[in-house]
Amino acid sequence: MAAKGIVRLTDLDDFIAPSQTCIKPIAVASEPNRTRVITYEGHDVYEEVDELGRRKTLKPVSITLNDCLACSGCITSSEAVLIEKQGPEELLSFIEHAKMESSRWLFVVTVSPQSRASIAARYELNMDSAERCIRQFFKNIGVDLVLDSTFARNLSLIATGMEFVDRYKAWQAKCSSKDLFPMICGICPGWICYAEKSVGDLVIPLISKARSPQAISGAIVKDYLLQMLRDFKCSYVEDCHPSRIYHITIMPCFDKKLEASRSSFVSSTGQLCELIDRTCPDFKHLQVDDDPEWLPFAAPQYRHSGSGSGGYLDFVFKYAAKELFNTDVETITYHVQKNNDLQEVYLDVNDQRVLTMALCYGFKNIQNLIRKIRNRKCAYHFVEIMACPNGCLNGGGQIREVTASSKSDLLNNVSSLYNSVRVLSPFEAPFVKELIDRWLGDLNSEKAKHFLRTQYEALKENDSFSFNVQW
């Protein structure tokens, strides 16, 4: 019998124990005909001495969380180990130090609905009770205001839908020579990091320019919140300056830390749970105070139709069907492909297929999608893409279980809780129109373009991410 030409290796393990040692390979330009010596003077002082005897004190290397999450060049470091160095303890420490300063700080927390669902599952609460307990917990440690990122997601969804319609019309008019499709959702930082560093110019033009709910939440907090609070006669903002706003977000994903700025702090759901367990054993029985200065968008208690990652495909599909083909779509039929993390939806008008969109979760499906785009065989008009299998409800920062069966049960419970609240369209959500009118003027204004849209670019091999969080 002839030998088969395939050798299959199984049960291989390429696991390397986590380490905090960073070995990121960086190219160093050599300088010919120069001799330099590094000397150690004690007390952690290192000096470089050139051939003329001139001395130069060398600065210590600092590695930050952003570099480690976005590096892709280090095989001995686990991001989980490094993330622990920027945990809730830093937040508590900052709040304590801020209380001793003479100038007033305003502490604002924005909680994602996926994180709230995970907390609700962990402490056996419904979504409303979980929101109230989370708010009271943060209020007890010194936070002034707790918001919900669902409100900002209204603007993110609308911006994404408008961008898609503009692209489709440009394609119909053939007024652009660029590849316009598929338009790829850009709210997942893990996907964006991969696209900028590993795929580059192939997909960067295809990624939606709409900002994520976290980014838009930050824009609202930093640019408009003080004015709004003063309109509501909130006493704790009378002597507060915009530069003294400290924004904390609770997100289901560690990579959301990549979106953080110097005056922002990102904590995962799991990190918040650890903090609650350690400091508030009676969390689920907290006595919740009424807040007379409650903002109308602080606790929406509604969700958007579609996936647990925000419903971007659902909204874009329905919005495009109405705007482009005057077709009202009430419900969407999802066609599962090879697995539940790859699903397609179609719109047929007069027996002609006019829209094909997809959910694409997990890097295996993402790589297959990239291959199709590279080979010019991708028929999708829009893709809701997330790096995590099962999307944001199963984000890497969510609360975890140990066994496979308990993981599945937990995810089902989190999904059930997330879907238990009422569904509203972004156009139906309360206060959205008022915010657009008062803050942005309209959705086509220059201010709206600045705060609701962003740009991406392919990173060169030796590009370095900015150092945002020192540890």
Image: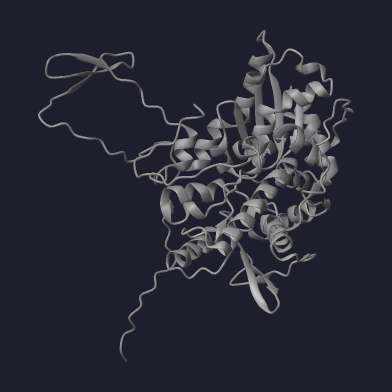
Q: Quadrant of residue 371?
A: bottom left
Q: Which of these two is toward me, 439 or 446?
A: 446
Is 320 positioned to the left or the right of 127 in the image?
left
* Quadrant of image for the N terminus: bottom left
Residue at point 52% right, 60% down? 366
Instruction: Please name the residue shown 83% across and 36% down the image.
Output: 132
Q: Position of residue 410 (x, y in %)?
A: 72, 54
Whether 371 is drawn above or below 6: the answer is above
Disc count in the image? 0
Q: Is residue 54 visible?
A: yes
Which residue is more in the foreground, 424 or 290?
Answer: 424
The residue at the point 81 percent across, 30 percent down is 136
The residue positioned farthest toward the left in the image shown: 33
137 sits to left or right of 369? right
> Residue 17: horizontal and vertical position, in percent?
44, 46
| Frontmost residue, 94 versus 156 | 156
Residue 268 shows in the view: no
Is 174 situated above or below 138?
Answer: below
Residue 95 vs residue 55: left or right? right
